[in-house]
Image: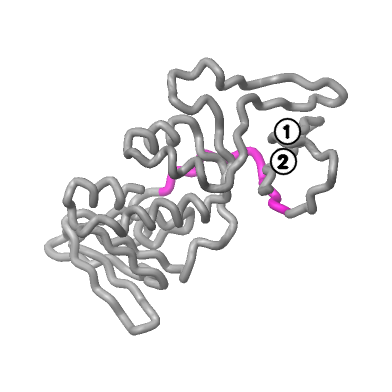
Amino acid sequence: MLGFLLARKGVEVIVLEKHKDFLRDFRGDTIHPSTLELMYELGLLEEFLRQPHQEVRQVQVHFGTEKATIADFSHLPTHCKFIAFMPQWDFLNFISTHARHCASFRLRMEAEVTDLLFENERIVGVRATTPQGELEVRADLVVGADGRSSTVRERADLEVMDLGAPIDVLWFGLSRRPGDPEQAFGFVDACQFMVLLGRG
């Protein structure tokens, strides 16, 4: 997304993605109303909403045998008063497809950043491995978005701030059955909870 926004302003951008595609599980399938508003501002909302997705206008949670609505998006000052549920690989494919229409945008798949390039104690680019061999990219700005075990952060010697998240998350897939709820539901019990993300 950052690469797309910069390229729209004419900034030369190269995004290095270590995988050959985006088809893998990420931490969430939610496109929030603020992101949908950005899609509107970019002139992409109508096309974006033609992609397969589910719209959640309220979030309901089961507390034991009781059910409560804990969020209602109908009052938001946005064009879309809902959360769109869409697998994140579909979202990334949509954004990268539109970014490629910008002359100053390049996306290199299967290019894994392995190191930073330094000159006079200043970061001036990155080194990456690709199926074709090693690649060096020089840049005025390097942005690391390479996850919790970030090579960029480690090589830049940036301190990790461990906030001590008090939970662990287990992801698993279940087949959908007739009668299952259409919208996302949470189930809360003593010291544990479950969230359902429907993927159609």
Which residue corresponds to the image point at 40% horizontal and 64% vertical from the top-left? 17
Residue nearest the viewer, comparing 103 with 158: 103
Q: Secondary structure at mark 1?
A: strand
Q: Quadrant of residue 77?
A: top left
User: Main structural element of the magenta stretch: helix, strand or loop?
Assistant: loop
Q: Horizontally, is 90 left or right of 108 in the view? A: right
Q: Are marks 2 and 1 in contact (CB under 8 Å)?
A: yes
Q: Could you say where residue 56 lies in the image, as x and y percent from the top left?
A: 62, 31
- Residue 12 lies in the magenta stretch: no
Q: Is residue 19 visible?
A: yes
Q: Horizontally, is 158 left or right of 142 in the view? A: right
Q: Quadrant of residue 36?
A: top left
Instruction: Find the magenta span and give its range.
Output: 160-172
Residue placed under numbered mark 2 in the picture? 196
| Amino acid type shown at disc 2 | Leu
Residue furthest toward the right?
65
Q: Which mark is residue 185?
A: 1
Q: Horizontally, is 71 left or right of 44 in the view? A: right
Which residue corresponds to the image point at 19% horizontal and 46% vertical from the top-left? 9
